[in-house]
Image: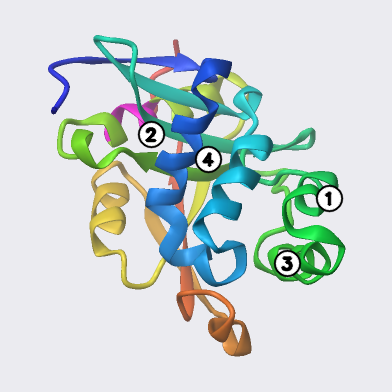
Amino acid sequence: MRPESFSIRRGFPMDQRDEAACIYWEAFGAKLGRVMGPDDRALAFLTRGLRPDHCFSAQDDTGRLIGLAGFKSVQGSFSGGTRRDLRRVYGMFGSAWRAGLLRLLSHEVDNERFLIDGIAVASQARGLGVGTALITTLCREAKRRGYPSVRLEVIEGNPRARALYEREGFTATHTDQLGLLRFAFGFAAATTMVRQLDDFPAD
């Protein structure tokens, strides 16, 4: 059932970790499935690893989780998890090669720009403005922290997400080809997009 209204909050309720993992995997499973799959293990890892202190969430009027927006900082990232989480879910060998590939995909903190670490909206809540509200909240948080701009990556083959970001003021700066890594992940290129915050209203 589609929600009639929603609200944005910092973090997400700890008793909704399973729901958070499902929403994230629904959005990014096609991108990460070859590395993080099978589904049951990916969900187990995400349930352990998603950090509520590095995200904002959207909840409908019944309290159900319908969206997530993560970010990175010098203290960590929303979806990174830990090596211990990887070992517990995938075992010693399975965690070793997965950790290497995930590190190659994304292992940086941009000291000049606020880094977004994934925006995911539940399928039943798409088209209601949840994504836009989450982006606005992230921009407000970046402004509050003193960043001049916000940065994210969007993979090729996701024109709907790119169109949303462009509507919200993001512009493409460059595209990185994954090369041989395209065989490990479900995409061949990712475009970096940046939104300047000089015209974004402060709280």
Please tell me the numbered disc located at residue 83.
1
Mark closest to the chain's N terminus, 3 or 1: 1
Question: Which residue type does callout 1 highlight?
Answer: Arg
- Mark 4 vs 1, N-terminal side: 1
Where is residue 108 drawn, in percent x and y? Answer: 73, 54
Distance of label 3 from label 1 (alpha carbons) = 10 Å
Give percent across and percent down for residue 95: 79, 62
Which element type, helix, strand or loop, lies under badge 1?
A: helix
Distance from label 4 to label 2 (Cα)?
13 Å
Q: Which mark is residue 149?
A: 4
Residue 76, located in which quarter of the rendered image? top right
Give the quarter of the image for residue 122: top left
Q: Amino acid at mark 3?
A: Arg
Residue at position x 62%, y 29% from top?
54
Q: Which residue is mark 2?
A: 135
What's the distance in space between the residues labelled 4 and 1, CA to CA?
31 Å
